Amino acid sequence: MKRPLILVTNDDGVNAPGIVALYQSMCSIGDVIVVAPDKHQSGKSSAITPSEPIRLHLLRKEEGLTIYACSGTPTDCIKMSINQILGRKPDLLVSGINYGPNTAISVIYSGTMGAAFEGCINGIPSIGVSLCTYEPGADFFYASQFTQQLAEQVLSKGLPQGTCLNVNIPNGIINGVRFCHQTDGLWKEEFVKRTDPAGRNYYWLSGYYKNNEPENEHSDEWAVNNGYIAIVPCKIDFTDYDFLNNYKNLNYEL
Amino acid sequence: MKRPLILVTNDDGVNAPGIVALYQSMCSIGDVIVVAPDKHQSGKSSAITPSEPIRLHLLRKEEGLTIYACSGTPTDCIKMSINQILGRKPDLLVSGINYGPNTAISVIYSGTMGAAFEGCINGIPSIGVSLCTYEPGADFFYASQFTQQLAEQVLSKGLPQGTCLNVNIPNGIINGVRFCHQTDGLWKEEFVKRTDPAGRNYYWLSGYYKNNEPENEHSDEWAVNNGYIAIVPCKIDFTDYDFLNNYKNLNYEL
């Protein structure tokens, strides 16, 4: 049987420990092509690079594993892979393993998930995976083993067209796996204001997450906070069909 | 009656003709605060800037109109507005008027819509508006007048929590307004490869849009291609609830 072709990327950069653990585990189930940013690209969402040239560097090529660094965003990496690198559509895309959670509304800012969305747009079964810790020297081994298991399930059983998976793995003892919805909540930003030597102000983005449904056992925040791996199926069609079916009730006059 | 407070931003930059037409029209219905990128930020999606300092410059302050330039992304502009500039939550956010369409899957890459999503996350009724042309010297007058009319409707009748509007206005004769779904399709990238004087390759992102449902009269692409203003209601909850209700049929073993 032909080995599956697996495209691997991330947003922490091609040398981040999370992606190394990820592509090593993926090599045991398929032929792996890594195309990942040449530097940190966290918080890049689905950003693309239309106004700057993009560079691509082959870092490594051996039986079953090829690694490229790309100067663009995670989404650029996927576009470059499909258009310039891969001879055929890959059987699976796995993005991660991200350093830190991408639960709740963080899915919208995440470069890890931006890459998964891009794979999904291109008809590739796609998964984004995050480890819920910022601890230096965090161990990605368990997370990579779980991702391998999930990847095998996705390869054999598929995903619905237009849907990708946002997977968040707690750092510690795991009680199980839960399919969840994206938690309702938001980041409350508290910019930190500093002053440079010329007396001009500048600001650092900071903040904390405010959960609007902390007790909801079907939400991804509840899951990871209670030791469960959270899997949120995410759609690339953002349309609010309930609104379309009911907007006449709003009596907009246009 | 108290005048509404309207937050205005875009991704083409604070001096782009589309935002000037927009804030001028908004001034006739409310007090306007413009917080927009100090440079072109197209294709930035919902990207944020966690690793660079952000600068803010007051450009203009007069009765009913205040304008700031911000060094960050469109999403950063909204976060800065809410946290550092505005004393209270604005009654409305309008992002645009973008130069070029943000129909179909382009909603996911759009900085204009990234800002509208950020407003929506923060509970502000939010609209992103685009004019479907790249023609130099395009006239944003009609688009700004329509946006004013829509803004008045949203101010008086509201939007559902968690839903913002993606508005695309054809450039030419208008046949009417249609509420639509996000067209199914994708950008087929055709990177243009060039070689620098040192013999190294680089790539420019290029491509064309492939519409998977060109005849669907309920899609936003059909609408704008047939002279209708397309309004797509977009959700910030990306969860695929159909999947959650049916995933057991996939028989994932985890």
Image: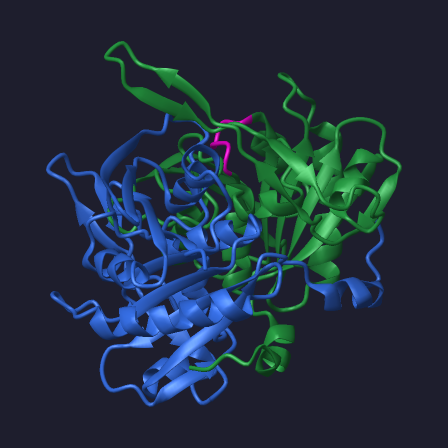
Chain colours: A green, B blue
For the record, the magenta segment spans: A11-16
Residue under the image location 85 percent in, 28 percent down:
A173
Depth check: A173 or B86 in front?
Answer: B86
Q: Position of residue A207 (x, y in %)?
A: 56, 29
- Magenta segment, prevailing SS (helix, strand or loop): loop
In the displayed structure image, the side of residue B3 where residue B195 appears, left or right = left
In the displayed structure image, the side of residue B101 where residue A207 appears, left or right = right
Q: Indicate whether B231 appears above or below A83.
A: below
The quarter holding residue B215 reads bottom left
Q: Position of residue A156 (x, y in %)?
A: 73, 60
Q: From this viewpoint, is residue B84 visible?
A: yes
Q: Indicate whether B198 appears above or below B246.
A: above
The quarter holding residue A60 reads top left
Q: Position of residue B212 (x, y in %)?
A: 47, 79
Quadrant of the drawing holding the N terminus of chain B: bottom left
A12 is within the stretch colored magenta: yes
Depth check: A228 or B113 in front?
Answer: B113
Q: From this viewpoint, is residue A24 visible?
A: no
Q: Position of residue B84 (x, y in %)?
A: 43, 32
Q: Indicate whether A53 appears above or below B136.
A: above
Q: Indicate whether A190 appears above or below A67.
A: above
B81 is within the stretch colored magenta: no
The quarter holding residue A246 reads bottom right
Depth check: A28 or A240 in front?
Answer: A240
Residue under the image location 38 percent in, 51 percent down:
A80
- Total labels drawn: 0
Residue under the image location 78 percent in, 37 percent down:
A224
- Residue occupying the far top of the picture: A197
In the displayed structure image, the side of residue B196 where residue A71 appears, left or right = right
